[in-house]
Every structure is written in C-alpha cells, then in structure tokens.
Image (spheres, helix red, strand yellow):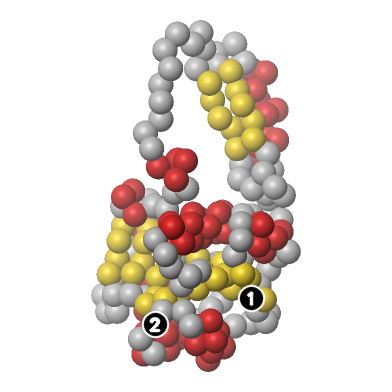
C-alpha cells in the first residue's frame, strides 16, 4: 500500500499522523506500506522514524507520475490524504490499472474518482453531491481514522477534585491555537486542571 500525504510546519502534521495510524494497522495485518511525500522534511522524518520508507516527489505530481510511482513500489492500493492540486484524473488512471484508490477527508473532485472516500460527518461532507461517483462514499464517525491509543473508550477515574482538560493544537499548530488557548487559561484555572501538549513542530 502506498500512502500519499505531506506534513510540515506550514501544513501541520494531521495528514501524516492520520496516514501513520492507517499504515500501522495495515502493517500489523501483514501489508507492506510505503509513503510518498513532497513537503517536509518534518513529516518525512517522523514517518522514517516509525520505520517506513519514504519516496520523495517532484513539486507537481501528475496522473502518469503517480501511476508510475504505484507501479515502481508494487502498490496494490494508494491512500491519498491531500490538500494539493493532484488531479482526479490521477485516480482514474490508477483505477484503470486496477490499483485500489482511497481518499481521506477530501472534499475535492478526487472523492468522486476514488474507490473509497472516507469523511467525518461534518456539515461540509453532508452537503456534498455524489452523482457520478466511481466508488463508495463512507461518511460517518465510524470511518474516522484513529491511532490505536485513541480507539478505546476513555477510562473515567472517580474522585478527582476537578476535571482534567487536554489542550492541543496539533503537531505544528500553524495557526497558533495552543498559545491563544493558554492565554485564556488563567480565567478558568479554578474550574479544571489543564494539560497542554506541544507537538513535534
């Protein structure tokens, strides 16, 4: 399986972490998984540290190049978790070559060209039209990709004086959400205990 995603300080690491979660499940099931990444190097470094091979890509990836990459790696399927200009035609070319195509959280025309399109049930996804879709739309919380440690129901420990709140803006937090939340914490510190996580970037 070929995982196509990007991650950097500018883009954030959400796409990378989501693909790593899926890759870990696939690897545990015995599949060979490789990554193809363009923007970095932060995202690619994290992927390599997890033991995956990463192919570097050109600045623009057209349909023929993506098909060639799938053939070179021997991938029977390609998972795309992107916010770039990769055209829907690239997925049509992959499907014509009998390569399974999957898109994650993708509102672009690529979702109509994929074998499977997985989206959370947010208003934007619910409002989408699927006329002429080549594959199956999987919209719902049951299709959201989670790391194994987040898949189990949370354990509630009684007796705590105040609730504990986790604050995180993601792996790089390019919008500075974490700092804005932290600036407001003195106003509510009597109500709860807060744990702030800063990511790799």
Q: Nearer the viewer, residue 130 or 148?
A: 148
Q: Residue 183's spot in the image, x, y percent?
A: 70, 28
The residue wearing badge 2 is 99
What residue do we see at 36% from left, 67% from top?
A: 117
Residue at the extreme front of the image, as rendered: 30
Q: Which element carries disc 1, helix, strand or loop?
A: strand
Q: Is residue 21 above or below residue 81?
A: above
Q: Residue 136's spot in the image, x, y percent?
A: 27, 69
Q: Nearer the viewer, residue 106 or 28?
A: 28
Residue 109 in view: no
Q: Which element carries disc 2, helix, strand or loop?
A: loop
Q: Which mark is residue 63?
A: none
What residue do we see at 61% from left, 69% from top?
A: 53
The residue wearing badge 1 is 55
Q: Is residue 40 above or below residue 185?
A: below
What residue do we see at 72% from left, 49% from top?
A: 201
């Amino acid at each position: 399986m070929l995982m196509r995603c990007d991650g950097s300080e500018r883009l954030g690491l959400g796409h990378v972490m989501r693909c790593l979660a899926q890759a870990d499940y696939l690897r545990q099931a015995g599949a060979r998984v490789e990554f193809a990444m363009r923007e970095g190097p932060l995202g690619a470094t994290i992927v390599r540290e997890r033991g995956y091979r990463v192919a570097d890509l050109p600045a623009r990836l057209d349909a023929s190049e993506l098909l060639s990459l799938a053939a070179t790696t021997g991938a029977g399927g390609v998972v795309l978790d992107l916010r770039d200009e990769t055209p829907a035609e690239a997925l049509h070319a992959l499907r014509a070559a009998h390569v399974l195509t999957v898109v994650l959280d993708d509102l672009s025309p690529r979702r109509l060209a994929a074998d499977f399109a997985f989206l959370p049930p947010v208003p934007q996804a619910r409002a989408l039209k699927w006329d002429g879709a080549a594959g199956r739309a999987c919209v719902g919380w049951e299709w959201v990709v989670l790391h194994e440690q987040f898949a189990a129901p949370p354990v509630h420990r009684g007796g705590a004086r105040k609730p504990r709140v986790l604050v995180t803006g993601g792996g790089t937090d390019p919008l500075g959400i974490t700092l804005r939340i932290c600036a407001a914490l003195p106003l509510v510190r009597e109500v709860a205990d807060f744990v702030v996580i800063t990511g790799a970037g």
